[in-house]
Each structure stands twice: as structure tokens, then as C-alpha cells.
Image (tube, grey):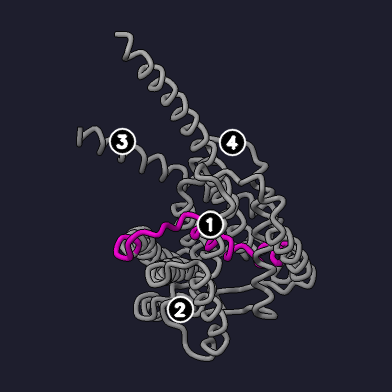
Amino acid sequence: MRPTEPLMYVSTFQDKENSKMEMKSKKRIYWLDNVKFMAMILVIAGHHEIGGEAGLLKSLIFTFHMPLFFMISGFFFKDNKLFVNVKKALKSYLPPYLIILALTLLFCCVIRPIIWPELPREMFDYKWILTTSLLHFNGFSVFWFLPCLLVSYILMSLIAKIFKNDLLRLIVIIVGLIAVKPLSNYPMYFQFQNALIAVAFMFIGYITKKYFFSPTYQLKKEISHNPIFIITSITSIAVWIYFVVTKNYINMVYQIYPFYPICLLGALGGCIVFLFLVNKLPESKILGKLGQNTMIIFTVHAVEHNFFPWDIYKSNFSEIGTFLVRLVLILVVSYVIILIKNSLNNLNNLYNQ
């Protein structure tokens, strides 16, 4: 029996190390889920336009919030086979896109005119919605984001497949950024022009994860002494503050990029500040569950944003009050859907066993 004792001790030690890794992984998930959830709150707040179209809050949010989502997506990007990545992208983004489209047609083209017949209907012409969403694949209103995310993820996968060196990948992405301006003079299909910008932020997220984070998704301590990171952070944050104060914000829906490409550097600065602040949030099971299901929150928000005429109520009640009511409704509906989804998954697992 004695010769097996060292092996037993090794096994016990490995179990302890695996347990530590699992604990770190859980902490890592909480932090990332907080980031995704708080980013979703920014989207809802930005669309509610507290303070109006020219308000400081909208400027604060719109200078970086959509690039942040693409950066988060790049953080999770993996150099898998091209087919695997394309299949993953289609499975992740196409179903919610079609669900939002179907619900938008139902609520906005059928139910909304019945409840609010006095409201204009031009924006909700079903033929136009189907043309821009299916034929052009540009999405409609809020959910332009999904085709852009799908196309940019596929572009990122193509670049990763063809070019194995990160420097070559960077050069290709920069060429894409240069092409954005001349391409903006032509009609957009498949959110292609926006996708070229989205890929740049995906790549930033990918590089950040690869070089500045540990395998357990913890920020490396030596990053605070990295001169490239320090100079980039200070410069981009300063540019971001300038764009916020001057209210020159990005609007990817309409391809508005003020002082392009400097606005992209400002967006990076906003992302850095946001990530730093969210990293200070405590762990929360509720936030974690919501953060793991931001696609459900986005789907609920995309439908209610087009269906419910919040502007009518904003003019009669306080903007903050209507925003809080809106936020609570979105989160409650989303949480119920999440619980139902989890229950169905559990029943399916029990059935398969």
C-alpha cells in the first residue's frame, strides 16, 4: 500500500488545485456577466434618451456603448476552424434576429395600430421592414446590431483563418477601417460598412484577452507597467472625454462617425473607463443570471422599443421615472423568460437521462 500513498497525495493536491481553478472561473464569470449586464443597461438608457437627443447622458453613452459590445464579443472569440465559428455565429445570432423580426411585425404592424391608432404608421410598413431586414439583411431599428454582429464575427473568423500572425491581422483590419469612408457613399447591405468597424473592436477584445489576461480571465498585474497600455489608455480616455463634452457621439445605425477615425479612439477610452468601473462591482447571483442572458434582455428591449410609444409618457411624466418603469418591466419580463428557459432545459436534461 505504501507505494500508492504519494500518488494519493498528488491526487489530493490536484483536486485542491482544480477546486481553486473552479473558484477562479466562477469569479471570472461573475465579472464578465457584470460587464455584459451593465452594458445592456447602457443600451436601454441610451435609447430612452434621458435629457433629450442633445443631452450629456446620451453623449456619454453613445460615444462608446456599441463598440463595447463588439469588444466583449472579441474577448470571447476563439481561433477555431472557420466552419465551427460560422456555425456558432449563425446559431447564436440568427434565431434571435428572426424572433425579433417576427415579434416586431406582430406587435408593431398589427397590435400597435389597434392600441394607438392616432400614432403615425409610416415607420412600421411591413413591406419596408421585410425588405430591409431580410433582403438587405440590415435589420430594423434597434436590432441592426444582430446582423452587424453576425457579419463581423464571420469576417473576424475569415481573417483569423487566413492570417495566423496578429500583426498581419491588424494590418488587414486597418485597411478595412480605411475603406469604411469611401464605402459609406454606397448603399449598405449586410451591415458591411459597420461590420468593418465592429471587427476592429472585436480584434481589440481578442488581443486584450490574449495578452493582458490570464487563462482564468484575471487581469495580469504587469499590465499596469506596460507603456503601450498606459499611453493608449491615457490618450484614448482624454479623447473620449473631449467627445463627451462636445457631444460628438457615434451613431452606427446611421453611420455617423464624427471626426473619423479619432472617434474610434475615443470609443476605446470609454470602454476602458467602463470596464474599470464595472470591475469594482460586487458579485451578485441575480446580475450573473441576467448577464448570462443578455440576448434575451436585448430581444425584449428590441420589441418593446418599437412597440411602446415611450415619448408620449416621457412628455407627461418625468424622464427618470419612465426610464425606471421601463427598465423594471424589461428586466422582469426577461427574468421570467430566463426562468422558463432554465426550467425547460432542466426538464430536457432529466428526460435525456
Residues packed near mark 2 inside 10 Å, few (<14), some (14 to 19) or many (20 plus): many
Kind of residue at badge 2: Phe
Label 2 to label 3, Cα distance in Å? 39 Å
Pick whichever, 195 or 245, lies toward us. Answer: 195
Label 4 element class: loop
In the picture, measured across the screen, residue 265 lies left or right of residue 201, that is right
Label 4 to label 1, Cα distance in Å? 19 Å
What range is drawn magenta here? 57-85
Kind of residue at badge 3: Asn
- Determine the residue located farthest toward the left in the rendered image: 352
Q: Give how far across and how far down residue 255 sits, in percent.
A: 57, 79
Please name the residue that numbered disc 3 is placed on.
346
Please name the residue that numbered disc 1 is placed on.
72
Please name the residue that numbered disc 2 is placed on.
192
Which tag, 1 or 2, sits closer to the chain's start?
A: 1
Per the picture, the main secondary structure of the magenta-coloured stretch is helix
Q: Is residue 59 visible?
A: yes
Kind of residue at badge 4: Glu
Determine contact: label 1, label 3, CB under 8 Å. Answer: no
Residue at 32% x, 13% y: name it.
3
Kind of residue at badge 1: Ile
Residues packed near mark 1 inside 10 Å, few (<14), some (14 to 19) or many (20 plus): many
Pick whichever, 215 or 99, lies toward us. Answer: 215
Please name the residue that numbered disc 4 is placed on.
283
